Image: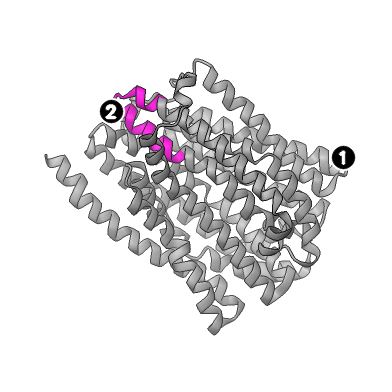
Amino acid sequence: MANVSSQDLGNQPIGKLLIRQAVPASIGILVMSLNILVDTIFVGNWIGSTAIAAINVVLPVSFFIAALGMAIGVGGSSIISRALGADNKAKALKTFGNQITLTLLFTVTFAVFGLLFVDTLIPAFGGKGNIFEPAKVYYEIILYGVPVLGFVMMGNNVIRAEGKPKFAMYAMLIPSIGNLLFDYIFINVLDYGMEGAAWATTGSYIVSFIFIFWFFMSNNSELKINFSQFRLDKTIVSEIGSLGFVTLARQAVVSVTFLLVNNALFNFGGETSVTAYAIVGRMMMFVLFPVFGITQGFIPIAGYNYGAKKYDRVKEVIATAIKYATLLGSIVFIGLMFFPEVITKWFTTDADVINETPNNMRWAFAAVPILALQLIGAAYFQAVGKALPALLLTLTRQAIFFIPLMYILPIFYGELGIWIAFPVSDVLSTIVTAYFLRREIKLNLLSKEIE
């Protein structure tokens, strides 16, 4: 896994290059996902099953604010990749400076407002009954660290855009390992309960921020900026915003989906159903790590080669990424269909939760083998700077299909209808993405390649 420079993105064989980009990204996502899983197991066993539900309630708010950093990172990184491919380093540097300014402005502002309206937001996201108090404790501490998390998410994407996947992997490993260590100290040794769980997460991202700051100050980074590049440029901010909005919209929809599903399940089955969804949600983050890793590895390669007008390589990386991701997704699918009971017992000893979760998990992951095409297809349009189709395809899965279905299907199937909505929306969104991706390749990539 030798490190890759930005120039190598346009020269190395696609299969080899995708592996070099995707493996570190996959490892980073795997460790982060394991961290979330183990963190949930620690909380469930050392604090209680209600604490799992409390953390799940807080996730939509903290995810959305942290997603601001990710959105700025992904949007700016698309510009940086294409600028480096076109040998326009000045634009890459200006973009990075603007990313830093935007991240600071937005994350601090939203964290402040999130703290001001804490008593309103928590019940709105399903933090009711016995869940409210532990959710409030966790929420307030997590929001203190959200600006730091925003910088971590932004910086990680920029590192990957430079063609430095191993350093991006390290930036993901550090908070994951740190969180588990801090969990043990704060929860098990010092017995700080929910406060300990929250400070463990916040502290781990502070350590990751220190690493990312070191990376950009060292000789490992090609992006050496000065204070003049922090001044916002209208054209660059507009492009970051249009592309980053795709990521922000996706994360916002994830937050809204958590809110809606938490409340719907609470109405059907109370705290037990909310906890079952929390476990399934953790598994969604965990088991799809190879697919997400390939998607992240794919983006800078597609963006760089599109900027360099090497359309044959863009076409090749699309096909290769879909093939690899589909194969890995199919392997994951087989494991989930056979062992959901074992997985559920990792998280809790609550008999009601153990009885309810496995069948729901099977439904939620029923369409995983075909999901790679939808993720890669939406990521392609974002990588090459086509914000509108990227936004629409990103929203098809949850906003356009899942949310309406989760209200329609329970009319006929009760609580089961919410879980059936997961695979049905996956299938429909994949069909739509396949159509638009095929059309893009035929009308744009092939025609430009001929020219």
Query: Is residue 77 one of those drawn in magenta?
Result: yes
Other-residue count near label 2 (Cα within 10 Å), few / some / many at <14 / 14–19 / ≥20: some
The secondary structure making up most of the magenta span is helix
**Quarter occupied by the C terminus:** top left
Which residue does the image show at 54% across and 33% down from the upper left?
Answer: 169
- Can you see residue 221? no
Which residue does the image show at 45% across and 40% down from the upper left?
Answer: 74
Residue 123 x/y as whole percent: 71, 63
Residue 57 x/y as whole percent: 68, 58
| Tag 2 secondary structure | loop
Q: Is residue 237 left or right of residue 103?
A: left
Is residue 156 or residue 357 the one in the foreground? 156
Which residue does the image show at 16% across and 42% down from the upper left?
Answer: 448
Which residue does the image show at 38% across and 31% down from the upper left?
Answer: 80
Residue 36 x/y as whole percent: 66, 47
- Where is residue 60, by image quadrant? bottom right
Residue beneath label 2, please? 86
The reply to whether dot 2 and dot 1 touch (C-beta < 8 Å) is no
Q: Amino acid at mark 1?
A: Val
Residue 326 x/y as whole percent: 41, 53
Q: Is 100 above or below relative to 134?
A: above
Name the N-terminal-most of marks 2 and 1: 2
Q: Is 212 above or below relative to 329?
A: above
| Tag 1 secondary structure | helix
Residue beneath label 1, please? 189
Q: What colouring does the structure picture have?
A: one colour
Q: Residue furthest top?
A: 219
Other-residue count near label 1 (Cα within 10 Å), few / some / many at <14 / 14–19 / ≥20: few
Q: Which residues are magenta?
A: 74-93
Q: Amino acid at mark 2?
A: Ala
Q: Is residue 373 left or right of residue 66?
A: left
Q: Residue furthest right?
A: 190
